[in-house]
Amino acid sequence: MITRREAALRLDIPLEMASRHGIPVRMSEAAFADLEENPPAWLLQSRANRTGRKPVWVQLTCDVCGFSEAARPKKWWPAFSYLTCAHHGYDELPEPASGFSRSEVDGIGSRFVGIVDEPRA
């Protein structure tokens, strides 16, 4: 059995779309395989509309401990130098390069902090 979220990840569609189009909360692997082999019109249209500019899902991985999760990227996320779980400290990451300053971005995925190293102005 797979969850609706796992089905959305595998189909590369938003979770909201999976729910709106009746993908059940849990489905068998056989039912999912049938959905992939015989996609409904809404799924075909979704794939045809893909521009490739913005991914539907991204894999977030902690650079300290390796914990990983899939999340929907947000427009406001900058390019991160590092991603860490919120409970890790600054001392667990390499120091910023000479001439760079470091800032944190909270609220990435369910538990991450994004670290951004930028050249000093």
Image (spheres, rainbow, N blue to C red):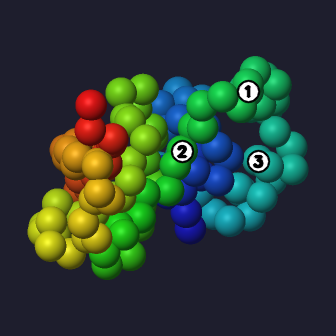
Helix, strand or loop for disc 2: loop
Q: Which mark is residue 57?
A: 2
Q: Residue 113: in sight, yes or no?
A: yes
Q: Nearer the viewer, residue 42 or 57?
A: 57
Picture disc at residue 50: 1
| Dot in front, 1 or 3 | 1
Image quadrant where residue 1 sits: bottom right
In the visual, does 50 lie left or right of 5? right
Inspect the image, locate mark 2, and give the three-letter code of the amino acid beneath it.
Answer: Trp
Residue depicted at 57% across the width and 37% down the height: 56
- Three-letter code, disc 1: Arg
Label whose residue precedes the other's in the sequence (1 or 3): 3
**Residue at image x 86%, y 43%?**
38
Q: Residues within 10 Å of mark 2 (few under 14, many from 20)?
A: some
Q: Considering the image in quadrants, where does the C terminus appear?
A: top left
At x 42%, y 26%, the residue is 75
Q: From the image, state whether disc 3 or disc 2 is nearer to you.
A: 2
- Disc 3 packing (10 Å; few <14; some 14–19; many ≥20): some
The residue closer to the viewer here, 39 or 53, is 53
Secondary structure category for the residue under label 1: loop
- Label 1 Cα neighbours within 10 Å, binned few <14 / some 14-19 / many ≥20: few
The location of residue 68, given as percent across then percent down, is 41, 67
> Pointer 1 and pointer 3: residues touching (CB < 8 Å)?
no
Reading the image, the residue beneath label 3 is 35
